[in-house]
Amino acid sequence: MTFTQKIVAPTDFSPASALALEAASLLAKQFGATIHLLYIYDPSLLSPLYVVPGAAALTAPTAEPREFEEGVLRELSRIREEHLKGLDKVELAVRQHTSASEGICEFATEVGADLVVLSTHGRTGLAHLLIGSVAERVVRHCPCPVLTMRSKAK
């Protein structure tokens, strides 16, 4: 049995997430693992009323989630070509969830992941207090080991 066979690599399309993708790629090459490249989005943010507190609950999202997900899949394909070259086993996934961290943990459970590799944005102070840390919550609640890559990329 090898160290890992299934690696979940969540991305938010930020420059910071590129570092984690490179680490996931190295591990997948070394262990012959499958990478599950994952994007989680909150469907309520597709509503034009999401900026009004509580208003999104009053109406269904107006943007077509299927169209949105097709665009996300195109971007995931581009990232696969750019950052995960030479890997035969890369699966793309788009999931809806109101919490990115919970969505990542649920997906890791669903696919039976052995490892989650993700980046942190390195926020501190007030930004960290207000925005929180998806990576922190994933580390605390994920059913498998989590490798975090600290990035200063903006």
Image (spheres, helix red, strand yellow):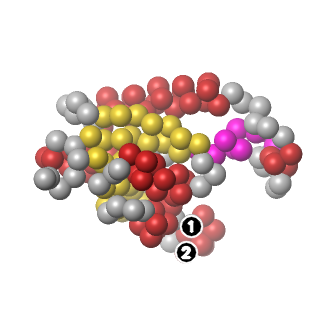
The x, y position of residue 59, in whole percent, is 84, 40
Label 1 Cα crowd, 10 Å radius (few <14 / some 14-19 / many 20+): few
Q: Quadrant of residue 35?
A: top left
Mark 2 residue type? Gly
Residue extending farthest bottom: 125
Is residue 41 placed above or below 138 in the rendered structure? above
In the image, 71 versus 8, the foreground residue is 8
Image point (86%, 45%), residue name:
58
The x, y position of residue 26, in whole percent, is 20, 47
Is residue 28 placed above or below 102 in the rendered structure? above
Is any atom of residue 152 visible in this view? no
Relative side of 139 to 24, left or right: right
Under tag 2, what secondary structure?
helix
Image point (46%, 66%), residue name:
141
Residue labelled with disc 2: 125
Relative side of 89 to 50, left or right: left
Q: Which residues are magenta?
A: 41-49
The numbered disc on residue 152 is none
Residue labelled with disc 1: 132
In the image, 28 versus 113, the foreground residue is 113
Mark 1 residue type? Gly
Magenta stretch containing residue 43, yes or no? yes
Magenta stretch containing residue 139, yes or no? no
Query: Of marks 2 and 1, which one's residue comes earlier in the chain?
Result: 2
